[in-house]
Amino acid sequence: MIVYGIWTFVAATLAFAISAVTGKFLIPFLHKINFGQTIREEGPKWHQGKQGTPVMGGIMFILAITVVGLLSTVAYALFGSQFITTFFADIHGEALYIFAGLGLALANGLIGFVDDYTKVVKKRNLGLTAVQKLIFQFAAAGVYLAVLGFSGCGTSTIIPFVGTVDLGFFYYIISAVVIVGVVNAVNLTDGIDGLDGSVTFFAAVAVMLIASRLYYLGVTALSAAVAGACLGFLVWNFHPAKVFMGDTGSLFLGGMVCGLAFALRMPILLLPLGIVYLCEMFSVMLQVGYFKLTHGKRLFKMSPIHHHFEMCGWSEVKIVAVFSVVTAVFGAISFLLVLFGV
């Protein structure tokens, strides 16, 4: 257990250091090449002061998570069978989920990079079209699920208090829709300083605790790396932000959150763990639907819902604090579901 704790601590600390130190060099570079954010005109008027803030800062935690995730997983796959066999029975299976999850996250990060690059070059807040994004995202999800399928991971999922459920072919359809939905929900959460990074930090901490409870050392280390890297990014992104993660970062985090949940064999946990992400996404869907049905009326003052609270007078720091607490509470609920239901 001492080795177990040290491994997790080192992963989190190393990821934090890489992410935070990378910002020291990346932010001046982004300034130098004029990779600044173009603020959309229909957003809160006071956000116009953020015009030109460097974007693509997500590269900081992408680098940190990828490096630490690969190092810890390779070490785990090579030496785990010798030192911690009492804890693990499926080392190679866990490593597969981790590598595939990193691939899913990186693929979505690449989609976000293309989107950010297009926005910066055209100097407007429009990159890839919605249809283009969805095509690429479903392709990434399809490849991810195909890798798991061809590797013999099966079509079963674990549901707390229910047990293992085999969904058959529908597993792939449902999973693809869930992955793309969550990835875009995380993307929508990135709207104010520090929000996406803070919410994902608490979600990753919850996954870390759940994975440790299930004795998944690889997933524990990876989720610790995600938490540490997000914290390192927040050094530069907390209000007032010196850099934005951009779609490069938010789409990567969306893929990473999905990868972690699937590595636990419990994607159902995306519901409580991603409660804030889902509220952000459904607030947009409800706003658009209500607007069309009522011919111009709005359900919220502005969507996604974090902008609604801004319009109600909440500061960005307060919104981040409240949304983080909500995520922490539902993360604790997720842990209890696994503790007593699995």
Image (cartoon, grey):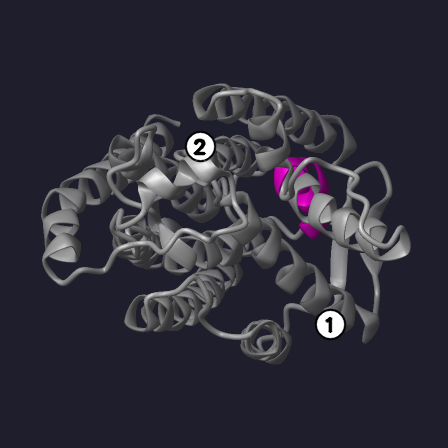
- Give left or right: position of 118 versus 145: left
Q: x, y percentage for residue 49?
A: 33, 39
- Give left or right: position of 85 versus 311: left
Instruction: State the residue at coordinates (46%, 35%).
Output: 195
Q: Is residue 7 visible?
A: no
Neighbor class of circle 2 (other Cα within 10 Å; few <14, some 14-19, many 20+) is: many
Label 1 amino acid? Answer: Tyr
Instruction: Give, as a single range, the part of the protein colored magenta.
Output: 266-278
Q: x, y percentage for residue 230?
A: 36, 39
* Kind of element beneath mark 2: helix
- Give left or right: position of 120 versus 258: left
Residue that mark 1 sits on: 172
- Report the disc number at residue 198: 2
- Report the disc number at residue 327: none
Q: Report the front residue among 12 and 84.
A: 12
Neighbor class of circle 1 (other Cα within 10 Å; few <14, some 14-19, many 20+) is: some
Q: Report the front residue among 128 and 163.
A: 128
